[in-house]
């Protein structure tokens, strides 16, 4: 309200906690005060709806290596006209990540410097796969995998009588990644190791949640069928650790 900020930065799908931020509400509030909204949707875009125009987002950034299921090495951004104009008027915007220069090159179907061209070919192919599945079906597949994972956690809690729970509150859960909070008797790293022995890679906890959580990424080209096998391997590992 005191107009102290030119912009807010926000993580759409927060990967260490599996938390989802509601962008439309946040953007509406920020714009009420003339504040630009800059979004990290690295694990959101292509896995969950991101309506850049309808939600009036000023800048959205994503990477190739998460829900787009491409090799790492490319970043994609969408900027609003308003934000590019704002950048054009900035006196010291610097050379790196210059939106105005990017925009000029877009009109020539070029990039300011040589991109990872091999990855652009991969992007074109993945774009065809996504179009064939349809983006709406892709979102639905992610929702299905997220719901499966949440139910699995509930079942695990019931079966073991232990305090397993989804870290993020029910109204703010990411569709692409779930952080599972553990009872104090278990350590996330042990679970990750046991699951690896069974042929699946899941994530350990991150930062302060390193030992008290583990994470399951259900994004990109993963399918409910494969996820079911991964959840089975994880439950198996946990039962083994609890029996020790
Ligand atoms: C993975 C990720 C990034 C960027 O990761 P890099 O591996 O450094 O490219 C940024 N934000 C979120 C939310 C992420 O999940």
Image (cartoon, helix red, strand yellow):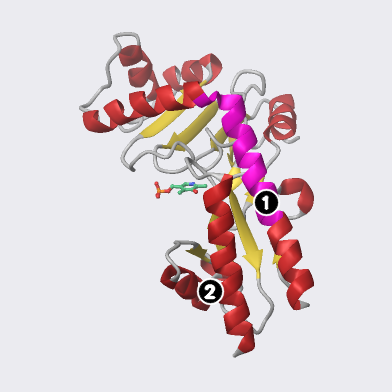
Occupied quadrant, residue 12: top right
Few, some or many C-alpha atoms within 10 Å of disc 2 (few <14, some 14-19, many ≥20)? Answer: many
Left or right of residue 130, residue 165 in this image: right
Q: CA distance from mark 1 to mark 2?
A: 19 Å
Q: Is residue 149 magenta?
A: yes
Q: Is residue 116 visible?
A: no
Few, some or many C-alpha atoms within 10 Å of disc 1 (few <14, some 14-19, many ≥20)? Answer: some
Q: Is residue 65 magenta?
A: no
Residue 29 placement (x, y as % from top left): 74, 31
Decide whether the magenta segment is chiefly helix, strand or loop. Answer: helix
User: Which residue is the extreme one toward the left?
Assistant: 114
Query: Which residue position is annotated with label 1?
Result: 148
Indicate the secondary structure of the residue bearing disc 2: helix
Occupied quadrant, residue 31: top right
Q: Is residue 67 visible?
A: yes
Query: Which residue position is annotated with label 2?
Result: 191
Residue 73 placement (x, y as % from top left): 31, 40
Q: Quadrant of the N terminus?
A: top right
Residue at image coords 62%, 46%: 145
Give the magenta part as a residue range. 133-150
Q: In this orientation, which residue lies closer to the viewer: 243 or 60?
A: 243
Indicate the secondary structure of the residue bearing disc 1: helix
| 1 or 2: tag closer to the N-terminus | 1
Question: Are the residues tagged 1 and 2 within 8 Å (C-beta)?
Answer: no
Q: In this orientation, which residue lies closer to the viewer: 234 or 3?
A: 234
Residue 184 placement (x, y as % from top left): 67, 81
Q: Quadrant of the C terminus?
A: bottom right
Residue at image coords 61%, 60%: 179
Ligand 1: does it lie within 8 Å of the C-beta at label 2?
no
């Amino acid at each position: 309200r005191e107009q102290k900020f030119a912009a807010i930065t926000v993580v759409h799908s927060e990967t260490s906690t599996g938390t989802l931020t509601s962008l439309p509400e946040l953007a509406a509030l920020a714009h009420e005060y003339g504040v630009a909204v800059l979004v990290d949707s690295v694990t959101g875009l292509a896995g969950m709806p991101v309506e850049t125009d309808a939600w009036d987002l000023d800048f959205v950034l994503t990477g190739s290596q998460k829900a787009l299921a491409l090799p790492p090495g490319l970043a994609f951004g969408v900027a609003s006209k308003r934000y590019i104009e704002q950048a054009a008027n900035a006196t010291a915007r610097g050379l790196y990540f210059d939106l105005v220069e990017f925009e000029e090159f877009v009109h020539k179907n070029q990039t300011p410097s040589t991109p990872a061209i091999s990855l652009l070919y991969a992007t074109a192919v993945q774009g065809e796969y996504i179009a064939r599945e349809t983006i709406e079906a892709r979102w639905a597949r992610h929702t299905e995998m997220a719901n499966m994972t949440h139910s699995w956690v509930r079942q695990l809690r019931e079966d073991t009588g232990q305090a397993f729970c989804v870290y993020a509150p029910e109204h703010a859960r990411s569709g692409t990644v779930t952080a599972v909070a553990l009872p104090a008797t278990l350590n996330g790293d042990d679970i990750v190791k046991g699951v690896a022995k069974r042929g699946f890679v899941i994530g350990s906890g991150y930062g302060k949640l390193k030992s008290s959580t583990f994470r399951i990424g259900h994004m990109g080209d993963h399918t409910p069928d494969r996820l079911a096998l991964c959840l089975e391997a994880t439950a198996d590992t946990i039962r083994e650790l609890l029996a020790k």
